[in-house]
Amino acid sequence: MVKNTNKAEAPKESGGLVLSDLGGDIGKAIVFPDGHFGLESAVWENAQRIADMLPIDITVFGDLTEENVASMLDKAKGAEFQVKNWTEYSSALSRYLKALHKVREKQAEVSENVAESRVQIAELEKNLSMSLANLESKFRQIVGNARSGVTGVQDDLKISLGKISSQYSEGKNKKLQKLTEETTKKEPTPYEEQSSNLVARFQELRNARYSGTPGVTQRIRSVS
């Protein structure tokens, strides 16, 4: 291995990578003593610190042993099982979430239908109540007008009957008064005077005939 006596040391306090010697001739490539493709050990230490943040132990540089390989194989198999499990889990979760979304959609649809039906029923009840109120108002108007009309006719009939009765009574009274006046003022006709005289004459003759003859009662008394 070619040693480079002009290797620049990276300042340990900064932990940074020195790039000043990367612009040299590729025919005289710089190979660092650690043999990691020209990168200093600090870079690999940083890479290891990053790898240590993962949930498993990972070696990013240095020598590997069979135990390291076996351990990684076990980790790989475990990861594959985890992949299978997580795949099934993800699929099941996806199915569950889709079904849950459908369930929520149907629940929302049912809720909306119920609310809409409630609004429709309220609208029908409102229209029915208004219609019944209007019909009740018309009914009462009809009944009121009918009763008012009947009462008016009855009143007119009473007035007419009263007027007729009054006119009849007045006419009858006038007729009776007129008849009385005519009877009082009426002079007897010659026939009435003659008849009256004949009756009076017959009565005088009858009285004169029986004036000296005792009556039936007297005759019965005298015999007894």
Image (spheres, rainbow, N blue to C red):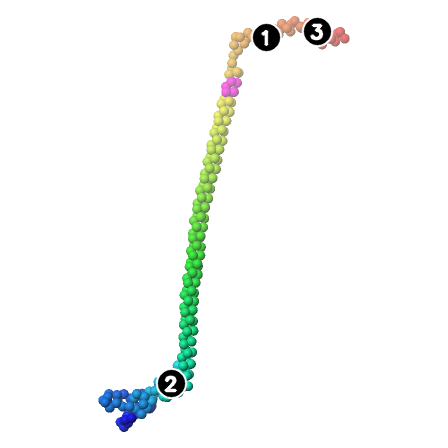
Crowding at mark 3 (Cα within 10 Å: few <14, some 14-19, many 20+): few
Q: Is residue 178 magenta?
A: yes
Span shown in magenta = 175-180
Q: Secondary structure at mark 1?
A: helix
Residue that badge 1 annotates: 199
Q: Is residue 11 above or below residue 87?
A: below
Return the mark for residue 59.
2
| Residue 200: x %, y % from top left | 59, 8
Horizontal relation, residue 48 to residue 25: left or right: right
Residue 77 position (above or below residue 44)? above
Looking at the picture, how far across and down is residue 82, in whole percent?
42, 76
Amino acid type of disc 1? Val
Residue 28 visible in the picture: yes
- Quadrant in the picture for the C terminus: top right
- Nearer-N-terminus badge (1/2): 2
- With 175 as the anchor, is 80 left or right in this view? left
Label tally = 3
Quadrant location of the N terminus in the rendered image: bottom left
Q: Which residue is mark 3?
A: 214
Asked where in the image residue 56 lies, by quadrant, the reply is: bottom left
In 3D space, how far apart are the residues under numbered discs 3 and 2 (Cα atoms)?
190 Å
Determine the residue positioned at 46% across, 42% down.
Answer: 140
Decide which of 95, 193 is in the foreground and name it: 95
Residue kind at label 3, given as amino acid type: Pro
Q: Earlier in the sequence, mark 3 or mark 2?
A: 2
Label 1 vs label 2, nearer the camera: 2
Q: Residues within 10 Å of mark 2 (few under 14, many from 20)?
A: some
